[in-house]
Amino acid sequence: MMIHLKRNWPAKLLSLLAAIVMWFFIMRDQNPVMEVTYTVPVQVQNLNSGYIVEDAPDTVRIVLTGPRDTIISMKSDNLRAYIDASGVKPGQNNVTIGFTPPAGMSLVEIKPDSIIINVDEYAERKVSVETVPIGKFSDDIALKSVTIVPKEVTVSGRKQLVNAVSKVVMKVNVAGQTKNFSAVSNLEAWDTAGNVLDVHISPNQGQVQYELNLLRKDKAISIAVPTVGTVADGYEIKSISTTPVQVTVTGREEMIDAVSEIQTEPIDVSGATASIQGSYNLVLPSGINSKSSTVQVKIEIQKKTT
């Protein structure tokens, strides 16, 4: 048996090598090496908690090579490039963008493969929230109260910008408002000159509740006639009427809303046996005004029926 194996061994070796080469070419044709390009997000790693980087690129382009089957089975959403920021200092830093290819893949290119980033110190502080009205209330509107939620927010970011924040404001359109209202709006950080600063605000929205009063509200109110004393024996009051039956009064909204009727001065009916008629003064509460100061009153008195 060994004699047969030793015969023509050069030809047999060549045949084996040819079979191996043929297998390689067949497999390469069925699962060829391919080159693919991806746009992947960039993560900043190992950054000192006291520093901040805001101008690092969001994405970079990478070129990979690998067998087609590997590329097809790979989840591109999991690909990430990174910047190792462990050695950066405040100011400009030239950093390299790294990428670790998945198993079975090779990295051909990262573009860009290095960049200059600006590193600043990180800072945060609490700042009160103020409202800035857009437009104005009409002359007959008085502002009763303003409630802001939240009253205070946290601003954070580059130390220089955070220190420059003078106030955090919420813009509110008040033009044409006549009743209590609320509004929700984004917050802005301003410096002393009113310039908007690029800092992070948490929370970044606020809500405001306005309570308003009308300085002058008109309302038609019924008239009531109080009487004092009692009519003569055997007589009774049949009816009481006024002309007009209502009077228009004016005043602050909360005062007007609290009034349900306007009374005349008391009318004495003591011992009366006949109807009483005449002009009587209106008694207006403090802060309530009316163009009319008197009304005509008629009190009908009649004998009691048995």
Image (spheres, rainbow, N blue to C red):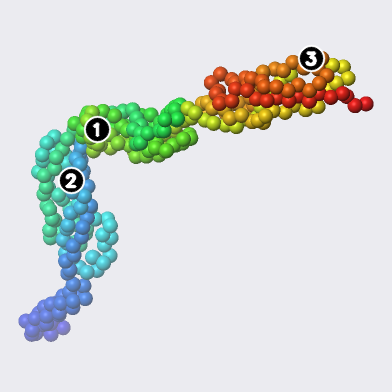
Residue in the foreground of this view, choosing between 39 and 26: 39
Compare residues 223 and 212 and report the one nearer the observer: 223
Task: From the top left corner, tell me how far across and down residue 192 is, in percent.
Answer: 23, 28
Please state, as top left, top right, bottom left or bottom right, where the N terminus lies in the image. Answer: bottom left
Which element type, helix, strand or loop, lies under badge 3?
loop
Q: Position of residue 77 (x, y in %)?
A: 28, 57
Mark 3 nearby-residue class (10 Å; few <14, some 14–19, many ≥20): few
Q: Amino acid at mark 3?
A: Ser
The answer to whether one can see residue 165 in this image is yes
Residues tagged 1 and 2 counted as in contact (Cβ below 8 A): no
Residue assigned mark 2: 56
Looking at the picture, which amino acid does disc 2 mark?
A: Ala
Q: Nearer the viewer, mark 3 or mark 2?
A: 3
230, above or below 1, in the image: above
> For this view, does 287 lie left or right of residue 134?
right
- The answer to whether the residues at label 3 and label 2 have Cβ atoms under 8 Å apart is no
Going from N to C along the chain, the mark reached first, 3 or 2, is 2
For marks 3 and 1, give the CA distance: 74 Å
Identify the residue at image location x=13%, y=77%: 21
On screen, 147 above or below 64?
A: above
Residue matched to label 1 = 194
Q: Which image quadrant: the C terminus?
A: top right
The quadrant where residue 183 appears: top left
Secondary structure, mark 2, is loop
Residue 39 lies, in percent from the top left, at 21, 57
Q: Where does label 3 land, which residue?
A: 270
First in residue order: circle 3 vs circle 1: 1
At x 13%, y 85%, the residue is 4
